[in-house]
Image (spheres, rainbow, N blue to C red):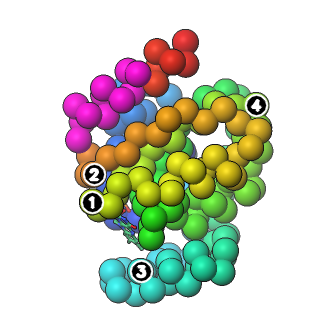
């Protein structure tokens, strides 16, 4: 199962690429309230939400989560961490006992605290080393994916 949040479509493209490669299912994390389309407005709101720990309400749940033992979890890096919608997902779904393979896309600042913060929110899960990508570099993603799949089996 590939679970992701994407604001501009880059993490979505990476998630779809991973889904194709692993032949799994895919689930998009969607907040009920859309984020503003202007970069300065979304940045301001993201900073506010991260500072206050706000968890946006999500449009839908992943109902059949018990069917999946391995979850790829993708987020864009927002202000050095996961987007608040991903925190909402993790706080409303029980991933204990599962393996999480995290990935993120960023604009040049790297993963920052993204994977650390996923680990903090999922103490009962096994969290693999994350894949951090700028854009959607297919060859780099494939190499990372092969290593993760070997580690899993
Ligand atoms: C609110 C906001 C905060 C961001 N913060 C960071 C950051 O801290 N570091 C970074 O490298 N990129 C940052 N970016 C850039 C995104 O991580 C990058 O463009 C990402 O690939 C977008 O993924 P998406 O198209 O799936 O939304 C930020 C973008 C937004 C909208």
Residue in front for this viewpoint, 57 or 70 = 70
- Numbered badge on residue 134: 2
- Numbered badge on residue 43: 3
Give the quarter of the image for residue 142.
top left
Please provide percent x and percent y for residue 91. 73, 57
Q: Nearer the viewer, mark 2 or mark 1?
A: 1
- Please tell me in which quarter of the rendered image ligand 1 is found: bottom left
- Numbered badge on residue 108: 1
Please provide percent x and percent y for residue 140. 26, 34
Span colored in magenta:
137-147
What distance separates the C-alpha of mark 2 from that of mark 3? 18 Å
Residue in front for this viewpoint, 139 or 114 = 114
Give the quarter of the image for residue 14.
top left
What distance separates the C-alpha of mark 2 from that of mark 1? 6 Å
Whether the residues at callouts 4 and 1 have beta carbons within 8 Å, the answer is no
Q: What residue is at 50 percent from the left and 35 percent from the top?
A: 129
């Amino acid at each position: 199962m590939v679970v992701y949040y994407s604001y501009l479509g880059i993490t979505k493209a990476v998630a779809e690429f991973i889904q194709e490669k692993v032949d799994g299912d895919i689930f998009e994390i969607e907040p009920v309230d859309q984020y503003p389309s202007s970069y300065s407005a979304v940045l301001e709101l993201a900073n506010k939400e991260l500072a206050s720990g706000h968890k946006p309400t999500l449009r839908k749940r992943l109902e059949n989560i018990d069917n999946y033992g391995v979850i790829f979890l993708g987020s864009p890096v927002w202000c050095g961490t996961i987007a608040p919608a991903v925190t909402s997902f993790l706080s409303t779904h029980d991933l204990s006992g599962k393996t999480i393979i995290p990935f993120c896309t960023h604009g040049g600042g790297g993963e920052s605290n993204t994977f650390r913060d996923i680990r903090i929110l999922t103490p009962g899960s096994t969290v693999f080393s994350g894949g951090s990508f700028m854009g959607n570099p297919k060859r780099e993603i494939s190499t990372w994916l092969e290593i993760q799949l070997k580690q899993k089996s």
